Image: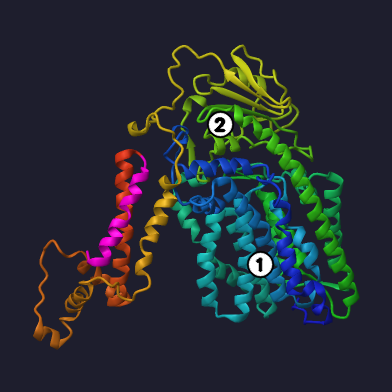
């Protein structure tokens, strides 16, 4: 259906920019109080960020290998690593996760403000219903990529009205790559929604449906270029498990729990309200649905129905798309002209729904975060760098108000640099790999999860795990939400308990168990006996910051004020133009020879035709201090095993030399 013209309702309070700004800012509120957002898998992600941030150094280097690769699951990881030089992993994660709900809300409101006109009365309820970051599971990389997918869809629709086709492709093709880098499923969702929107727009312009479908697919095809990265990565990128197709009972649970927070009746009532509004949009003559979002929402619903629960190792694949398909459907609903009174009533109801859900989510997060903080207190009993077997008493699938402790042990990795069995090891989806083969199968998720015997998802039995875990690898056992003494083994000695969780020391060693260090792990001889924690000046982030800072004095001058540099620039001009300028050939003779003074002369040859001689010289000269500083710090690290504090006094030297003479 064609978009509705602006009416008097479009100037109402719910259509203003200040209301949109308040809605975006309000999305921060539930995440302001908790130090760690109480999302089920977030502590595990924080543990992974610590492993990545300290790859190859400290105690974690004995426990995990990091195999760097370009994969479609790095959204929050890369941002946290970029922030790590100035923020530790926990506050950096908090900052990034706090930003995801406002970004999601802003992306949807951007689309509404640019496209919907009078239909913007739906804004209040839209803001709450599709906020997946507030669900119990987390999936922060996916949620970030989903926010990007919504923004990408809005950008695609806007550029379709205001710019030529090539501009859309020039912008969205690289944007699709960034979305894929955040998370593969968000990228797939972007492509699905773009095809639906493009197909709908073409049919509105009068193209036959089959022609419109082919052309829409062709338009979106260039955005599929990350598939080449997946194929080039080999079989590991596609090796994860796939299964649990068409599990209709589970899909029904996903629909009912779309607003899952803590109170079952209340959460289901919210879903029911959304369902009633959706039905009214179909049946009521006073409501209509904007066509450009109708097909994307339908495609999202179809994807939810046909996708399996597990795809290439990723869990909950089908349910991830459901909130966003619902969001697009809600975004598409608007009142028909002449029903401004109805628009005002629904706007008031939607705003009340948004505020109420916001308040209850804030309360639920406060309660859940306190429970997670209490459980994490056990980390005080864990030695730094130890190997810890973790067993979590996980509620059954039917339990609505669970404590969300499945991955709480990830905080022990972040805080105590321990090895545990809660980290994900998925081919093609994770960069970290455990270095304790003797610990298998207790070296990865989900062996930390102990489910009730009647749950069909049972992965491990508590007593079996206690009897069989490798005593050579693990020196501690941490049971969560089990009473102290539940781990019945003669060699397990309780050393800490709060009544609900306990930490045990492993007292015995198996015959022939010589060391708990993993096979192949090596420590640098220069760092033996030293504290393995890195100081701020020993981090990669500091090296990068110093290298960048060394370039600052040369940014302002068009020509760096070095004594002999103008003379060198004259020589560069001669070598570049002597064959084309008759006067230069009369005054100078230039012949290439193999001599030990051709550094910048050679670099100028490819750069000058691209950016001009003066800018080429400036770019090369600016890079020299950064290379010098990096080299000095690298030498210090190789000699000492880490960067000593005294190395910082060597840093001004290359910058000072540059001020008086050219290299």
At horizontal 33% and vertical 50% (from top left) the residue drawn is: 649
Q: Which mark is residue 196?
A: 1
457 left or right of 505 in image: right
Helix, strand or loop: magenta stretch:
helix
Q: Position of residue 266 (x, y in %)?
A: 86, 49
Residue 515 x/y as whole percent: 44, 20
User: Which of pointers 2 and 1 lies earlier in the amino acid sequence?
Assistant: 1
**Front in this rendered view, residue 455 or 114:** 114
The residue lying at 51 percent from left, 67 percent from top is 173
Write down the region rendered in magenta.
Answer: 642-663
- Image quarter hosting the C terminus: bottom left
| Image position of 252 (left or right of 73) | right
> Counting other residues with Cα less than 10 Å from the Cα at mark 2, is it few (<14), some (14-19), or many (20 or more)?
many
Q: Is 539 positioned to the left or the right of 383 in the image? A: left
Q: Nearer the viewer, mark 2 or mark 1?
A: 2
From this view, report whether residue 312 is shown above or below residue 570: above
Q: Inspect this view and state whether residue 307 appears.
A: yes
* Discs 2, 1 touching: Cβ within 8 Å: no
Residue 328 in view in this figure: no
Tell me residue 303's x, y (percent).
68, 55
Q: Residue at x 80, y 49 (%)?
A: 256
Q: Which residue is mark 2?
A: 420
């Amino acid at each position: 259906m064609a978009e509705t013209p602006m009416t008097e309702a479009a100037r109402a309070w719910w259509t203003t920019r200040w209301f949109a700004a308040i809605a975006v800012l309000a999305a921060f509120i539930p995440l302001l109080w908790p130090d760690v957002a109480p999302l089920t898998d977030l502590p595990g992600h924080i543990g992974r960020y610590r492993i990545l941030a300290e790859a190859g150094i400290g105690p974690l280097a004995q426990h995990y290998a990091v195999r760097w690769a370009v994969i479609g699951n790095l959204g929050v990881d890369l941002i946290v690593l970029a922030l790590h030089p100035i923020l530790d992993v926990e506050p950096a994660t908090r900052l990034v996760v706090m930003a995801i709900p406002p970004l999601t809300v802003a992306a949807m409101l951007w689309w509404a403000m640019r496209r919907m006109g009078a239909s913007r009365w739906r804004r209040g309820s839209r803001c709450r219903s599709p906020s997946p970051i507030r669900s119990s599971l987390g999936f922060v990389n996916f949620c970030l990529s989903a926010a990007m997918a919504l923004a990408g869809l809005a950008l695609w629709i806007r550029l379709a009205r205001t710019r030529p086709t090539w501009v859309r492709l020039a912008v969205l093709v690289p944007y699709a790559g960034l979305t894929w880098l955040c998370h593969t499923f968000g990228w797939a969702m972007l492509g699905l929604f773009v095809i639906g929107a493009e197909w709908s727009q073409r049919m509105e312009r009068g193209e036959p449906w089959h022609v419109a479908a082919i052309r829409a697919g062709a338009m979106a095809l260039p955005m599929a270029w990350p598939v080449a990265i997946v194929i080039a990565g080999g079989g590991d990128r596609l090796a994860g498990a796939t299964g649990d197709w068409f599990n209709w009972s589970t899909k029904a649970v996903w629909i009912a729990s779309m607003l899952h927070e803590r109170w079952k009746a209340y959460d289901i009532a919210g879903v029911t309200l959304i369902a009633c509004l959706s039905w009214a949009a179909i049946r009521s003559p006073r409501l209509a649905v904007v066509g450009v979002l109708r097909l994307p929402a339908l495609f999202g619903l179809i994807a939810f129905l046909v996708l399996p629960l597990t795809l290439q190792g990723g869990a909950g694949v089908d349910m991830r798309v459901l909130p966003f398909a619902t969001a697009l459907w809600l975004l598409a609903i608007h009142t028909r002209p002449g029903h401004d009174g109805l628009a005002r009533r629904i706007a008031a109801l939607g705003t009340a729904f948004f505020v109420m859900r916001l308040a209850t989510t804030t309360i639920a997060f406060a309660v859940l975060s306190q429970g997670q903080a209490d459980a994490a207190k056990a980390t005080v009993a864990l030695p730094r760098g130890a190997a810890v077997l973790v067993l979590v008493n996980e509620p059954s699938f039917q339990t609505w108000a669970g404590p969300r402790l499945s991955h709480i042990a990830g905080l022990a990795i972040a805080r105590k640099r321990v090895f545990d069995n809660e980290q994900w090891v998925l081919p093609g989806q994770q960069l970290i790999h455990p270095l304790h083969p003797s610990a298998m199968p207790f070296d990865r998720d989900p062996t930390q999860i102990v489910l009730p015997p009647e749950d069909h998802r049972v992965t491990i039995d508590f007593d079996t795990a206690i009897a069989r875990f490798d005593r050579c690898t693990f020196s501690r056992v941490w049971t969560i939400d089990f009473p102290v003494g539940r781990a019945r083994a003669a060699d397990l000695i309780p050393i800490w308990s709060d009544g609900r969780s306990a930490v045990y020391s492993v007292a015995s060693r198996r015959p022939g168990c010589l060391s708990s260090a993993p096979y192949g792990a090596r420590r640098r001889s220069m760092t033996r006996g030293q504290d393995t924690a890195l100081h701020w000046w020993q981090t990669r982030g500091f090296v990068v910051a110093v290298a960048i800072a060394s370039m600052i004095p040369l940014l302002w001058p068009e020509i760096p004020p070095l004594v002999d540099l103008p003379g060198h620039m004259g020589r560069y001009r001669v070598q570049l133009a002597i064959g084309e300028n008759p006067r230069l050939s009369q005054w100078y003779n230039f012949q290439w020879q193999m001599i030990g003074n051709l550094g910048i002369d050679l670099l100028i040859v490819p750069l000058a035709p691209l950016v001009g001689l003066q800018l080429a010289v400036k770019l090369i000269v600016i890079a020299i201090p950064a290379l010098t500083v990096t080299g000095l710090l690298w030498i210090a690290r190789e000699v000492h095993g880490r960067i000593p504090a005294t190395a910082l006094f060597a840093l001004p030297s290359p910058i000072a030399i540059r001020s008086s003479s050219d290299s």
